[in-house]
Image (cartoon, grey):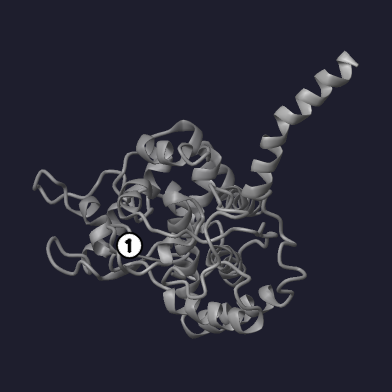
Amino acid sequence: MANYLILLCLLLAMAPLCFSNKSEGGPLYPQFYDHSCPKLEQIVKSVVAKAVAKEPRMAASLLRLHFHDCFVKGCDGGVLLDSSGSIISEKRSNPNRNSARGFEVIDEIKAAVEKECPETVSCADILAITARDSTVLAGGPYWEVPLGRRDSLDASLSGSNYNIPAPNNTFQTILTKFKLKGLDIVDLVALSGSHTIGNARCTSFRQRLYNQTGNGKPDSTLNAAYAAQLRTRCPQSGGDQNLFVLDYQTPFKFDNSYYKNLLAYKGLLSSDEILVTQNKESLKLVKLYAENNELFFQHFAESMVKMGNIAPLTGSRGEIRKICRRINH
């Protein structure tokens, strides 16, 4: 009898933990919408394919939105919210202002999904699937996207300003920002490979072309001929919004040429080139990926799943937004 009472007490003590875990929802998994919205992935793929066919650059823009969402308060669709009431949009932050794009594509996907299965699929999950489809359309790896995220009820302008790695951050600062999100140095180097597609603005790398001391000489870790070429369209003042491809070899193809560029000191951003100049372990990874495209694809896919699992809202937390740009009420 005594043993039975002890067992009963243990079960009662554990009950609140069981119920609390259930209310917060379980882990994400790829089959989450198989019954509630079976055509989801087909709809997303169709709209993304149309957008990328119209403008190849859009693949990189949509992939970047997922990064900039997850690094703030977790993968919760917060980056999509417009300013309204007490909400100050993350679109105003330094990493997003004048550069984050693709919101209209997400709007189009959401409208099509709402028509097919109303109030079922989160904007956060749409961002995650869109990032994968954009990668595949550009020639990159495919991965199963774990699903089941819900949408945030607010945004964080300060989080967007301080948590997203910046082009001029030191290696240690960037690695720390990754580690704070549960990501490691392999994730950092593999996910940086997303810069194999897309563009950067002159204002993001000008400091590498014109030394801050005023002597006008380019950064010593930037190939001199490449720097001279960049300076023709990125002057010392003006032209802030002029766009440059991040990977000059294959700008619209998702491949490992990004890493080959870094080894030739032709990484566009400081945050790219420091992967080979400031840390031995990251340099080793850059060399591995430059030699082995298959390994890069494998690690990139694994790191995207890992990143997509940063602090998701599940169960009863958050909501399923009807329109991605605003909360439901």
The residue positioned 55% from the left and 56% from the top of the image is 256
Asked whether, in this view, residue 233 is left or right of residue 221, the answer is left
Asked whether, in this view, residue 148 is left or right of residue 290, the answer is right
Q: Nearer the viewer, residue 246 or 125?
A: 125
Q: Is residue 259 visible?
A: no
The residue positioned 39% from the left and 67% from the top of the image is 81
Q: Which residue is mark 1?
A: 87
The residue positioned 60% from the left and 66% from the top of the image is 129
Q: Quadrant of the rendered structure where residue 177 is?
A: top left
Asked whether, in this view, residue 220 is left or right of residue 298, the answer is left
Screen quadrant of the C terminus: bottom left
Residue 239 vs 216, above or below: the answer is below
x, y percentage for residue 224?
28, 53
| Residue type, label 1 | Ile
Q: Is residue 107 visible?
A: yes
Screen quadrant of the N terminus: top right
x, y percentage for residue 167?
32, 51
Residue 161 vs 249, above or below: the answer is above
Q: Nearer the viewer, residue 284 or 105?
A: 105
Q: Secondary structure at mark 1?
A: loop
x, y percentage for residue 26?
68, 49
Asked whether, in this view, residue 78 is left or right of residue 300, the answer is left
The residue positioned 47% from the left and 37% from the top of the image is 179
Residue lying farthest to the left in this orientation: 214
Crowd around label 1: few <14 · some 14–19 · many ≥20 (10 Å): some
